[in-house]
Image: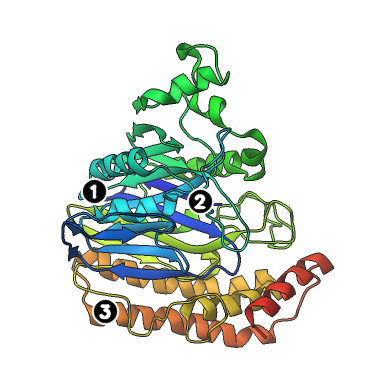
Amino acid sequence: MCDTIVTLGSTTEEGFTLFGKNSDREPDEAQNIFIVPHKEYNSNDTVKCTYLTIPQVSETARVLLCQPFWMFGAEMGANEYGVVIGNEAIFTREKPDKIGLTGMDLVRLALERSQTAKQALEVIIELLKKHGQGGNCGYRFKLKYMSSFLIADKKEAYVLETVKTWWAWKKIKDVWSISNIISLQKDYDSCSEGLIDNAIKKGYCKKREDFNFRKCYSAKFMTWAAKGAEREKRSRALLSQRKMRLTTRDFINILRDHGENSQWTPNRGPDATLCLHAADKLFRRTQTVCSLVAKTGEGGQFFYATGASNSCISPFFPVFSPDTTVSGEYSEGSENYNSKSYWWESERFHRKALLNFNSAQAEIQPLIIKYEEETISSIENSLSTLNQKQINEYFTRARAIVKNWGSKLDRLPSVNLGWGFSHYWRGYNKRNGII
């Protein structure tokens, strides 16, 4: 499950668009930071997506992807023109097709084929019309769903929500958030012809005037189980608290939110937190495995990612600028634990931190905050374009924080987590080869 947030320049402190997303997936599904270069193609070239092969366009943009290791597509990303997109699983009364483009495929394809948010919106709609959406989107566990998208650039933002090849969209006026629930009700700006007709035909509503996207199409049980309504309410409340003054720092803090319960711990809950932690509970088997915050405007483009799970204990580091790639120290992760992979190196420490999470968090958060405040201030105040040396140095510092913290975790006393929670994580450690 995931959460995505956006605010336009009219509600931020400095007039930039801000975008953020937590990607929540299975606990051992490594998600990599991946940069695809700008490229030109021949007229007969094709592109192999997760399940479909489709015609390629003549030219694709340079893109940043936060990509589950086994997919073609991405949970969220940005391109060289400052377009940013995140997608959410939404569960509807319509059964997903066995095969088609996944929501993650559509994120990548739209980023590669657009220069504005409106153009990205149109790309997704056209791809849905031609190829449909479908296929398994889960890693170890099969999961099929429809897709909701939050799309932004330096001037505009849109929410696009889909059911099969049908869709509805709304232009965002100031702030918005999406979660694992249809966010549009009667407030859409445009919708496809078949969306309302199908709802009437299936008995979801009686006439066009009654149509409410959320009420008509939501699959009640799965939408309830995903806790999308609670997380949507929480993210919007946090956005409204700082409206007109929102900054990069605020967006990072929102993605780290565990709610108002001061007694929160990963093994006890509550379940509907924006920074999500997996546990031995029927409806909490996913966790935040990567996070992205973007700031884009006339004054520049700035992108920060964790490249690791648990945004509350992972530093956000700068990841994308016009002429840079990922740090040479950064190695991708795949199915099994690999000490060279930043994602897996961080994950091993995160799982050790679960033995006494509050103490472990108290140890690392001051270090992370200090690093992020220095980094964000240095980059954004100068409004300068990062070079490769700076990208490398910022990542090296972030990794050192994680390593130094991880080496101290064995000194913390363990707490009683309960047999179920401990057994749950021991099982993953054994499966992933983490000792």
- Give the label on residue 390, or none: 3
Task: Tell me the element at label 3.
Answer: helix
Task: Tell me the element at label 2.
Answer: loop
Category of crowding for the residue at label 3, using alpha-carbon neighbours closer than 10 angstroms: few (below 14), some (14–19), many (at least 20): some
- Give the label on residue 138, or none: none
Q: Is residue 194 left or right of residue 407?
A: left
Which mark is in front, 1 or 2? 2
The tag earlier along the polypeptide, 3 or 1, is: 1
- Residue lying at 41% horizontally and 59% vertically, measured from the top left: 74
- Kindly identify which residue carries mark 1: 154
Q: Nearer the viewer, residue 98 or 400?
A: 98
Q: How far from the left and from the top, in percent, is residue 128?
A: 37, 41
Q: How far from the left and from the top, in percent, is residue 149?
A: 40, 44
Task: Tell me the element at label 1.
Answer: loop
The image quarter containing residue 44 is: bottom left
The amino acid pointed to by label 2 is Gly
The amino acid pointed to by label 1 is Lys
